[in-house]
Amino acid sequence: MDGVLVALTNFGKLHSIQGDYDQAEQYFLNSLTISRSYGMKADIGINLYNLGVLALHQNNFPQALHYFRDYFRSARTTNEEMAARNFFIALAAVAGGTNQPEQAARLFGAAQETENRFSPFNRAVLNRLIQMARDQLGTTRLKPCKLKAAQ
């Protein structure tokens, strides 16, 4: 079953990178359905997070927030520290994209307490939205920091 989930997730990521967000969403949702039916908690979290980031790429902030909240509820049962870190960064990106720069700064600051790595594609959207918050606050209120790429 793991191979099927990996394939579906990878197809979702591929379509996302190609800008085919509808198809990417279908792959992530199919993987999520299978993960839930077999009780695969780690995979449930991965799919919810991927769906949230996909929503960020489309500037669909309410949908992103919905998926990130579900992600946190799911992922904290498998790795609470990683779930909290990812959740803070995701919420910072949502806040940055919805004209809440101070909230974005606080959330991103909380996430910076621990290290996290993202793929270059997902890091780009998160950094773009966090940069929006920086621009709104001005350079004196938010220190520059870039998310690290996945190894």
Image (cartoon, rainbow, N blue to C red):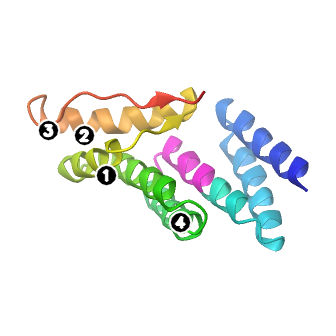
Rendered position, 122 above or below 68: above
Q: What residue is at 13 percent from the left and 28 percent from the top? A: 139
| Disc 2 to disc 1, C-alpha distance | 8 Å
Which amino acid, by three-letter code, is at mark 1? Ala
Percent x, y for residue 149? 52, 27
First-in-chain label (2 vs 1) = 1
User: Could you tell me if the residues under marks 2 and 4 are in contact, i.e. CB atoms within 8 Å?
Assistant: no
Q: What residue is at 77 percent from the left and 71 percent from the top? A: 39
Residue at image mark 2: 133
Based on the picture, tell me whether residue 11 belongs to the magenta stretch.
no
For marks 3 and 4, give the one nearer the viewer. 4
Which amino acid, by three-letter code, is at mark 2? Ala
Residue at image mark 4: 76
Residue 112: image quadrant is top left
Q: What residue is at 29 percent from the left and 52 percent from the top? A: 107
User: Could you tell me if the residues under marks 2 and 1 are in contact, i.e. CB atoms within 8 Å?
Assistant: yes
> What range of the chain is rendered magenta?
49-60
First-in-chain label (2 vs 4) = 4
For marks 2 and 4, give the one nearer the viewer. 4
User: Could you tell me if the residues under marks 3 and 2 are in contact, i.e. CB atoms within 8 Å?
Assistant: yes
Label 4 SS = loop
Label 1 SS = helix
